[in-house]
Amino acid sequence: MSYLGVFLTFARNSLIRDMTFRANFLIEFISSTAWMLMNLGFYALVYRYTGNIAGWSKYEFFVFISTTMFVNSLVQAFFMPNAQELSEMVRTGGLDFALLKPIDTQFLVSLHRVNWSSLGNFVIACLLLGYALPRIEGYQLSPLAVVLYPLFVVAGVLILYSVMIALAATSIWLGRNQSLYDFWFYITNFSRYPMEIYDGAYGLPLRWAFTFIVPILVVINVPAGIMAKPILADNPYGPWLAVFAVAATVGSLAFSRWVFQRALASYRSASS
Amino acid sequence: MSAIQIRNLQKSYRVYQKKEGLAASLAGLFRREYRTVEAVKGIDLDVEGGEFVAFLGPNGAGKTTTLKLLSGVISPTGGEATVLGHVPWRRENDYRRRFALVMGQKNQLWWDLPAQESFKLHQKIYRIDPADFARTRDELCELLDITRLLQQPVRELSLGERMKMELTAALLHSPDVLFLDEPTIGLDVVAQHNIQKFLKHYQEIRGITILLTSHYMKDVAALCKRVVVIARGEIIYDGSLSGIVDAFSGHKVLSVQFAGERMPGDLARYGEVLEEVAPKAKLRVDRTAIAKVLSSVLAEHAVEDVSVEDPPLEEVIAEMFARNQATEVADAAAKPVAAPPAT
């Protein structure tokens, strides 16, 4: 419970800080929302030329997009500013202070800042989901989907977090390492599309790698599938994919923890 | 058992030897040469509970590295240390709740927020009882005279005010051991004095163990009875501050005021002439010869006033560091030279 108290204080202090810089907060809020809306407009345009992409109809895909927005806004609000800062903390020796605190260092480093303005997209995602679901042909909302959807969104957030913190932690070994962290943006790009599009001689290896090696394809696909398509009923692989997503979440977290601990053990600190 | 026990503690780093020029930099992409830097070379030290000990030494001597090892920020390459019975680099929460590290060159408070928000965060992280927290905070703020600044964002505070806030944050959980790494660096004389006064008072009433590194001799003279001098990763002196002069200074300063206007012309035969403004002169005289020189000066000249003093502490220490650096060069060239005597 004390960890929750610490986290709430982080969240509170971050909000006070964000409110001090009101204009900055508003600009961030507006620009990230505008970016998501432009993305949405782009897919609306694409669907003027086709009825479905890899088995996803327009409104099903809108559910997919809103899932992407949920996951991304959560990652951006809670983890991204911290992972970004880690490499700087290593370079300047600021990590010293984190190591002195009688609290889990990974928890402290991963959550000490909350970027509240990123939650704007969370609200947009709610609206988009509410708009798209009733427009899917013959859609019936199942109670199971209502329960599982948020759980798998959180699982997806945790997978992306694990990849992010593991990449950011390498800066502890390498002294300074913004580029490996940037790599996160390259690979997580792949998670933003339905896994069905990764097909054929070039697509299948990608699908395989991004499912079983770096499991980022299950991040959006599993919750979006649960919500938009009766993944558990129709698709014979559906339930297994969901089970796999749970295993992938646990595995990713364990792996990132291992990397983080190993990195901390060899921390050199900056000279002062 | 001592509060701090250090046995043969070592820390070495492997650093990349960067060469000059673009071609060499490109070659460095493929083949790198590394050099091992021994920051701490087998230190032994015992500090009793309640002691206030100063670490002196030139830049790069290993003072900060030692403090970081004792704080568990970094792990050693060899040797052992325990602080309050804990091995620091195991980073146990039980240990981390009992000490604090303050670094004059770095700040840990949230830059854009008033310090009191950072204090509340410390309360949560250290699990400080709310009543204890309020009492300790008020007490510290009153002692340091910063109560009126609690609402102000840290970035708007002066360096001295910020250091007081840093100290408060570090002491909120009432640590038993405090590591201070140059806490008065960059501060003006008044701010330095205030911090010294506070540390002295706090240490006296709480009886906590403090290790301090500083380049300001005033800090050390005001606060610490015991001084440990580190150079090149080794302890070369451990004793009182005044003892440094006896151990490391080979000379005394003889000041003479001659009677009348005429100055003797051959002062140099007594020792090196430091200053000569008639009718006064200052001479640097070998410590072993001081009695002899003094009696001949008095016998051979009409003298109005005379005094024999130790050279200023700063000078002795600068000389000692310089000598140590010279030894380093000699070391590299020839066989090891015996270390200066320790008391």
Image (tube, rainbow, N blue to C red):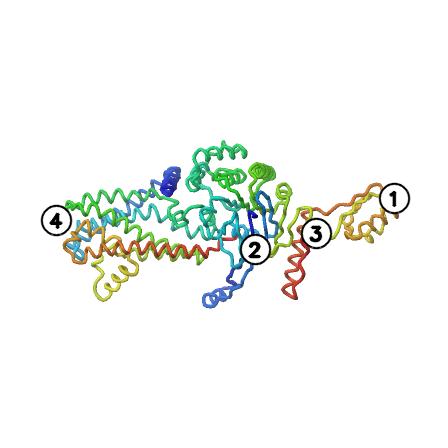
Q: Is residue B75 visible?
A: yes
The answer to whether the residues at label 1 and label 2 have Cβ atoms under 8 Å apart is: no
- Label 3 or label 1, whichever lies nearer to me, is 3
Q: At 53% across and 55% down in the image, what residue appears?
A: B80
- Label 2 or label 4, whichever lies nearer to me, is 2
Q: Which numbered dot is residue B7?
A: 2
* Residue linked to disc 4: A137
* Marks 4 and 3 belong to one chain: no
* Residue linked to disc 3: B247
Q: Which numbered dot is residue B258?
A: none
View extreme (front): residue? B1
* Residue linked to disc 1: B302
Give me the chain letter of mark 1.
B
- Classify 10 Å Cα crowding around label 1: few (below 14), some (14-19), many (20 and above): some
* Marks 2 and 4 belong to one chain: no
- Label 2 or label 3, whichever lies nearer to me, is 2
